[in-house]
Image: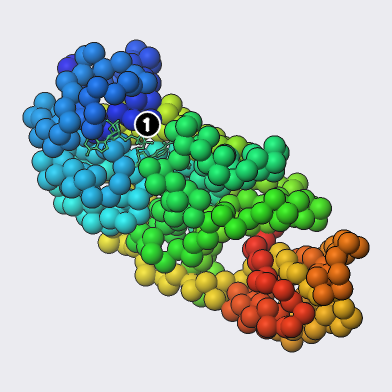
Amino acid sequence: MEPVKVGLLGLGTVGGGTVNVLTRNAAEITRRAGRGIEITHAAARDLKKARICKTGNIKLTTDPQQVVDDPEVQIIVELIGGETLAKEMVMRAIAKGKHVVTANKALIANYGNEIFAAAQARGVMVAFEAAVAGGIPIIKAVREGLAGNNIEWLAGIINGTGNFILTEMRDKGSNFADVLVEAQRLGYAEADPTFDVEGIDAAHKLSILAAIAFGIPLQFKKVYTEGITKITREDVNYAEQLGYRIKHLGIAKRTPNGIEMRVHPTLIPERRLIANVDGVMNAVLVKGDAVGPTMYYGAGAGAEATASAVVADIIDVVRMLTADPENRVPHLAFQADALSNVPILPMEEVITCYYLKMQAADKPGVLADITRILGERNISIEAMIQKEPAESFSNEERTATIIMLTHKVIEGSMNQAIREIEALDAIKGPVTRIRMEHLSR
Ligand code: NDP
Ligand code: HSE
């Protein structure tokens, strides 16, 4: 049988990795797919640029539309990134009856509902395994492997760049900005790295995971999102003294009132496996009612790790080219007409534990005021550290650092308590709040 011809949009980190993996493993891939797979046409912005892959046998263009319109190409692999051109090309490919593979989580999170409807109407596949957690086959695991479960919650380190930065800061005392530059050099970071460090990329991925886990439409705009930019080395050290690690987590949880979707730095007990996932590695914990907790671990970014997921999707498409189109696995795991409209909980209604850090004037009664404010809202304290000020400071300058861990409390009550604590004369500056998850049940 003739090889299937693939058109590639983008020859950067992931595009280059995809060419390399498809070329190196061609024989094994053909055995798995049942047919050869050949990239025949590719687009990049600058055709003179040095590439990580050989492009000798590929027709090159600077115009992605030429690739999409190429009548020989049956599968379009979108690895340009961004939302405007990528969406235009993906919709065009679908309209032309071509199958699509993409690693673009921003595109799926923002426009997936529309893209999937168009793909379903046209009877083509849109595969996006590489969009979440790089090389980890987490979409397939949740959508297919755990299909018999009621998923109760999932929590994941789903941004490689952010985890790389937190790890380097903790282990080597490196500076935030320097590690970010290194993550960019290694090809981990997004074109706009604020997506990584402000949690937007993780929120894109979380909205995709939540849709697949709970059978809800993609709702990226409802994800509560906090990045890692405010985490200091001090917070990392205090957390360690208390037996915790700070990780940037995406959490989606089914509750009786609705679904929590949140991305923020989180204290995790250091004995948990996920607390020890370091560097660019990602991990996703998924709790199903039947299977219990399961964990998926692997490289969350990088050329060939991501290409591994892209190529697996291409193979899936090639296998399905001859299969019954009515019997495909639905895009969001549940049949499109069976998605539920269970509400997404506002952040004020989320219940979790907290790490609080504050600077307090070194005088009597301050601690009593803080504990009274917390007590009035039924916020109980699990642990506390008080760091006395250095003797060299004058009486006016002397502030003690107080760190508290709390038991579970509703976010709205904690917000009120923090506002009141910050209003105390003795409290200097804002209270640092990091949410904390035990991830045990
Ligand atoms: P890169 O910036 O490395 O690659 C983008 C490619 O698209 C480049 O080859 C660029 O051309 C090409 N391109 C951009 N604009 C145009 C245009 N207007 N016309 C033609 N070609 C264009 O990005 P990545 O490979 O890192 O990321 C690609 C996608 O994969 C993104 O959606 C990203 O979020 C996602 N992703 C990335 C991961 C990673 O580890 N990097 C992991 C998982 C997903 P040129 O090279 O000439 O500039
Ligand atoms: N910038 C992303 C990350 C790439 O660092 O996780 C993988 O999606």
Which secondary structure, mark 1? helix
Residue placed at 24% from the left, 28% from the top?
46
Residue placed at 57% from the left, 39% from the top?
179
Depth check: give the residue in front, 150 or 163: 163
Q: Position of residue 321 (x, y in %)?
A: 21, 32
Q: Decide if ligand 1 comes within 8 Å of the CB at mark 1.
A: yes
The answer to whether 257 is drawn above or below residue 177 in the figure is below
Regarding residue 253, the answer to whether it shows in the image is: yes
Left or right, residue 326 beside residue 159: left
Left or right, residue 71 beside residue 78: left
Left or right, residue 310 beside residue 367: left
From the image, tell me which residue sits under label 1.
14
Graded by Cα atoms within 10 Å as few (under 14), some (14 to 19) or many (20 or more), the crowding at tag 1 reads many
Examine the image and state in which quarter residue 384 appears: bottom right
Depth check: give the residue in front, 163 or 341: 163
- The quadrant of the picture occupied by the N terminus is top left
Examine the image and state in which quarter residue 86 appears: top left
Residue placed at 44% from the left, 55% from the top?
200
Q: Position of residue 30 (x, y in %)?
A: 31, 17
Residue placed at 62% from the left, 43% from the top?
175
Q: Quadrant of ligand 1?
A: top left
- The quadrant of the picture occupied by the C terminus is bottom right
Depth check: give the residue in front, 351 or 88: 88
Depth check: give the residue in front, 283 or 160: 160
Q: Which residue appears farthest toward the bottom when viewing the image?
A: 376
- The count of marks equals 1
Examine the image and state in which quarter residue 326 appears: top left
Left or right, residue 209 beside residue 59: right
